[in-house]
């Protein structure tokens, strides 16, 4: 699915969540403090112990580039997807070595390859801080005051935790304000690449087969996490199941779904359908077109933006699927019925009606205000890494001088370590790519918002887009991490004195950005937040906590069974085999994107072709779950999530257990491939726990 | 698709045809007198000669059990589908030999196995008799008189032709009365079975995979046609293409599509959607349930009705697909737009308006009359072979004494040879099956039509269904072909004197049947026929003869290219390979209906697994096309049609070139399978023309 890319392509609006209906079937992305124990016991006669849950949680990791993973050996071996590792593979590539295309294997520890800016988080602590956060907002003058009070309290909680434990500490909003939790993460930044297959093996079928099943992808990558310069010594890793997932088996996914809008009110969904999705689809199409044209110019260009085109196409397919879901009358009717049920039950109880009855109208009002703002929020962008550095540096030096509670949320004390790690990444930046992205973004913005738009004015000052972009990218020194460090260290004075053209432009943009942010926060976000909190509480009051919150890129547990589903007039099988890989390649005459990788081609006669390769389960997943482990009742790893089927795209709004499927690489297929396609038996031995 | 079965399950209503819109894309089931020469020249730069067309026509055959086929060797070898030959395989089976399940191979000529009642027709002559048929109806008193006059003229034309040439002679209504053609067939009845694979290989994937693609079916059977006791010596056979169909290649299908309703008026389509499809679906579901329950009783039962369950499920899936098509707003909107276009153009021309302008209202009126009649027409049935013999014998002896032009159409002189061949078939009849079918049909009819229905009264005389059926089936001697012959030979007197209970019941049913037939003919069929003729002529007047007629189980030429199509969020490949067979079997853990046949299982390591097995083309086909040859520009056989994809089910009403596909076995796959799975190299040599 390339779940990862999806999330990273939608940095702007993660606002449209509300609260959750009681789950049914195998639906749900459950927090580890509230796993669906009753349903597991009733339906599967399975009663996981707290130890089972803790072990799975502590073996699961979040990657800061938007994916999930898990520890799979006592020596810090970390399993995720090739497409999650793609960025890091590209950053390590050189003109001599294209690790994305050709893959990578470190036969010895000293060959393991450091990633420039990867951060791995393990959720080691969770505390309910709802009372403290909600309490802080009591008696606030209005919604904006409440929002500010909650933000300040959240910053304080995060800082206290960070100071006390040294752990990365994030307060997470769940049930859209119904609950707040402090999540404490152990963070690792010394992460080294051990193995990746060729991209063609990982992404066989390319964009056409993306988000579909049956699939034949070997979408795996292995890192090793180091601690104090040595491989991490840990008991929190998943034992390998050689047999792997079997049809009909109960399985679990432990990972980090990025975002869902399952509990958006109908008014919010219509905003998505009518404004956000079409605008975003147009934006993505524009970028894909521009970047593919760029790729055609030279082979070097082709490689430079390949990862990005991959991500954009992935997002585009996901958005088209979402748009289709929202134009499906059945989907909308289901959402309307859910909303009506809750609203009727609230209306039937005078107490509840008094507390929460006006929430829907408040949301609808905020949606009306948001509607004209959305084009600006989506299109005011440069897509330039250098400009993003510039704006963050300009804001950073100002924000860190303020009391923590008064800062913009992304500059809270507790998050500064991770932020600085990103800002000082040594990963290379390519001027030609920067220009391409920036020109494309500004051109579309100018078309849609008009040249007089304040944001565009601040960047272009009435000038020509091409010339301005050339001057900015060619003139800036921000490509050098040392220069960025000097500005951060020099603080407000250094930034104010800088004549770096990108910094100068960012100084002009900053007030426009802040005004827009504050307007949106005070008039829209705060209303959503207040109404969402009401809806969350109303839902608790009516249905109890028999529910899971919308996804927030925090650790969740899904469960389901390994099973096929109705498709194409017949039935999709529970798993695929290596036979199917060779069938699909041959049936397209080995033409891209259905060509075999050289190693797959060579290994044809070595493999036991009937070995399961990929499989599906009814576990409820979405973007961000890429790289999540699939485990069985014994907590053994039976698979590795890498995608959802085409029907899962509607899962952003509705889970349909008959057709929504998580697609994973099968653990038996991973071993067969490592041993016989890639000849890396030592690595397979380490996974299988063999000496 | 099992296109064959579809047709045989809908014997009742082939009325709802009108005339054809100008074809576009690769649409069309063209008559051989009017092939799409301009389009082939313009689009493919292909100009078939008359010789090319004649050779293909004379190499194509129609099988009297509803399928198509072709001659593939100079010694009368005839290629069709296993599922077309299934009936004959079953009729030849014994308690010792289950040829349906296990397949068959005649290693020597004397082992070739005679089929009991198969008739093969080759279209050797075609003459336009429109003027004569339409002329006969001129000055008729009313629509019924016109219908009778046309029927009488048709009977005369057929008889004259039969007398003069000895050929089977059928007058075919095309463009729904816009044209009438005399089709003359050379008929062969000495047809012997040479080869069939195991059913599991032919029908891998069973009912779930039926009407879908990608597929992995080896759905072939080979007969040899004998003439005067010797293998037919013919030059009219298709040369084999060893390479077979290649992606992107222009190909043709020459076969016998059974029926389509592409040009039904919207009123007729609504009748199908609202009345016919639901009623027929319920009927089919009832039969499937009853027969599957019967199968569970004993292994012998399971085998006895297996072919029929196969057919019923096939029809059911087809009807469900049709129903879905008719509830698709896009499909209906397209039909409405087509109708509006023609109607507007007719209205714009006073001459045309005067001649044809009232046709739509006339159809709508006939539809209103037909609506309440439909349940009777669908449900008044026994599904008993013995009862069918009885009623036909009772009618036969009366009808043949009348002048040819006054007989019921199915007793016209020209068709009597074929009819007697069927009535005297030595194929075994199983009383337990007869009882099952009859009880099921009568029970449903009683439920829906009420016990007082005249037809039911005539059979049951107020008695209990089970007891009556037992008495009829146990008491009749009609299972014996010699007894049937004695009644036919004894004529009216013998039939009138017979106390055989089935004959006695048929004598009671006959007048009810006739009254219903006459009412329907006089008030509905005749109106449809008259209106259809107007619509056909209007269409010719407006669009010219740039069109093909709806399917009529007569020989047609389709064309298209070998190509995949959008499916399941990605692309279906142009062909599949043997790799895919083993993938799909393994991915369902070899569970039925995805288990391999024993010979396929054993041949796994012998095969070149990358050999194409099945493929798709955009050729326009429907039920009845099963067994049709697919040929290339050189007229060589590159494949064997056996099905359509799930999207082709809407093809009964609309052809959608982006997704409608014919599914065929690939000629290279046939050779690979014959040689390596079945070890019948001599047969492969004969196909390939090797000494």
Image (spheres, coloured by chain):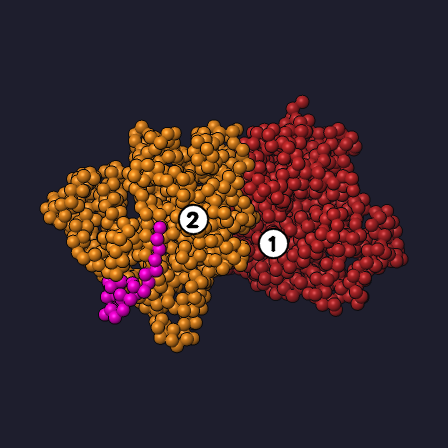
Chain colours: A orange, B red
Q: Nearer the viewer, residue B301 or B515?
A: B301
Q: Nearer the viewer, residue B484 or A564?
A: A564
Estimate how packed mark 2 is, as few (under 14), some (14 to 19) or many (20 or more) residues with alpha carbons within 10 Å: many
Q: Name, please, the residue furthest toward the top.
A: B691
Compared across the picture, whether B409 is left or right of B635 comes to right
Q: Which mark is residue B319?
A: 1
Mark 2, residue position: A56
The subunit letter for the residue under badge 1 reads B
Q: Nearer the viewer, residue A214 or B622?
A: A214
Query: Can you tell which of label 2 and label 1 is closer to the viewer?
Result: 2
- Provide the residue span drawn in magenta: A124-150
Q: Residue at x 42, y 41 (%)?
A: A72
Residue A172 magenta-drawn?
no
Compared across the picture, whether A59 is left or right of A152 comes to right
Q: Residue at x 20, y 39 (%)?
A: A481
Q: Residue at x 22, y 59 (%)?
A: A405
The subunit letter for the residue under badge 2 reads A
- Above or below, B219 against A260 in this view is above
Percent across and percent down for residue B656 are: 51, 48
Q: Residue at x 24, y 64 (%)?
A: A149
């Amino acid at each position: 699915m390339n779940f990862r890319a999806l999330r990273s392509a939608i940095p702007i609006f993660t606002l449209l969540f509300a609260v959750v209906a009681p789950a049914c079937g195998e639906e749900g992305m459950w927090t580890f403090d509230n796993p669906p124990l009753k349903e597991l016991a009733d339906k599967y006669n399975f009663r996981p112990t707290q130890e089972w849950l803790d072990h799975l949680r502590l073996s699961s990791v979040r990657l800061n580039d938007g994916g999930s993973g898990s520890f799979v050996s006592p020596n810090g071996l970390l399993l995720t997807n090739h497409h999650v590792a793609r960025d890091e593979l590209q950053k390590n590539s050189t003109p001599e070595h294209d690790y994305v295309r050709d893959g990578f294997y470190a036969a010895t520890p000293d060959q393991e390859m450091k990633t420039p800016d990867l951060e791995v988080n393990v959720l080691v602590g969770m505390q309910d801080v709802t009372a403290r956060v909600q309490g802080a907002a009591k008696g606030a003058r209005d919604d904006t005051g409440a929002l500010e009070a909650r933000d300040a309290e959240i910053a304080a909680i995060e800082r206290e935790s960070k100071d006390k434990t040294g752990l990365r500490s994030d307060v997470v909003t769940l049930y859209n304000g119904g609950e707040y939790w402090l999540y404490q993460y152990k963070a690792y930044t010394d992460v080294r690449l051990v193995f990746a297959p060729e991209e063609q093996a990982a992404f066989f079928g390319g964009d056409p087969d993306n988000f579909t099943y049956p699939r034949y992808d070997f979408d795996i990558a292995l890192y090793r996490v180091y601690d104090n310069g040595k491989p991490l010594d840990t008991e929190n890793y998943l034992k390998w199941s050689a047999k792997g997932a079997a049809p009909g088996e109960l399985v679990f996914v432990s990972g980090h779904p990025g975002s869902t809008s399952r509990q958006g009110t109908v008014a919010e969904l219509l905003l998505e359908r009518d404004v956000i999705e079409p605008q975003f689809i147009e934006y993505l199409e524009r970028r894909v077109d521009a970047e593919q044209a760029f790729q055609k110019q030279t082979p070097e260009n082709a490689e430079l933006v390949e990862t990005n085109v991959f991500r954009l196409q992935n997002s585009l397919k996901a958005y088209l699927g979402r748009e289709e879901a929202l134009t499906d009358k059945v989907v909308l009717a289901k959402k309307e019925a859910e909303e009506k049920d809750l609203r009727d039950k609230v209306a039937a109880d005078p107490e509840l009606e008094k507390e929460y009855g006006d929430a829907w109208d408040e949301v609808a009002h905020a949606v009306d205000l948001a509607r004209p703002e959305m084009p600006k929020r989506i299109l005011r962008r440069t897509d330039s890494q250098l400009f993003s550095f510039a704006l963050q540096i300009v804001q950073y030096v100002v924000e860190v001088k303020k009391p923590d509670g008064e800062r913009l949320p992304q500059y809270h004390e507790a998050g500064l370590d991770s932020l600085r790690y990103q800002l000082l990444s040594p990963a290379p930046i390519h001027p030609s790519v920067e220009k391409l992205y920036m020109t494309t973004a500004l051109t579309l913005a100018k078309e849609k918002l008009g040249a007089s738009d304040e944001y565009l004015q601040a960047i272009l000052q009435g000038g020509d887009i091409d010339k301005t972009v050339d001057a900015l990218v060619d003139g800036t020194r921000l490509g050098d991490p040392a220069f960025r460090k000097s500005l951060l260290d020099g603080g407000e004075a250094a930034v104010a004195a800088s004549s770096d053209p990108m910094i100068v432009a960012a100084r002009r943009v900053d007030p426009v950005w802040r005004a827009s942010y504050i307007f949106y926060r005070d008039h829209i976000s705060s209303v959503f937040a207040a109404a969402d909190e009401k809806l969350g509480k109303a839902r608790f009051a009516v249905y109890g906590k028999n529910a899971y919150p919308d996804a927030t890129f925090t650790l969740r547990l899904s469960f389901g069974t390994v099973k096929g589903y109705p498709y194409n007039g017949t039935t999709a099988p529970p798993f695929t085999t290596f036979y199917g890989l060779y069938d699909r390649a041959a049936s397209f005459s080995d033409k891209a994107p259905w060509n075999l990788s050289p190693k797959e081609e060579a290994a044809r006669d070595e493999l036991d072709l009937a070995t399961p390769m990929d499989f599906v389960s009814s576990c409820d997943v979405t973007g961000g779950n890429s790289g999540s482990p699939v485990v069985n009742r014994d907590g053994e790893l039976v698979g590795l999530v890498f995608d959802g089927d085409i029907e899962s795209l509607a899962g952003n709004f509705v889970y349909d257990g008959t057709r929504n499927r998580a697609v994973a690489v099968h653990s038996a297929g991973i071993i067969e491939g490592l041993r016989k396609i890639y000849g890396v038996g030592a690595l397979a031995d380490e996974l299988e726990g063999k000496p």
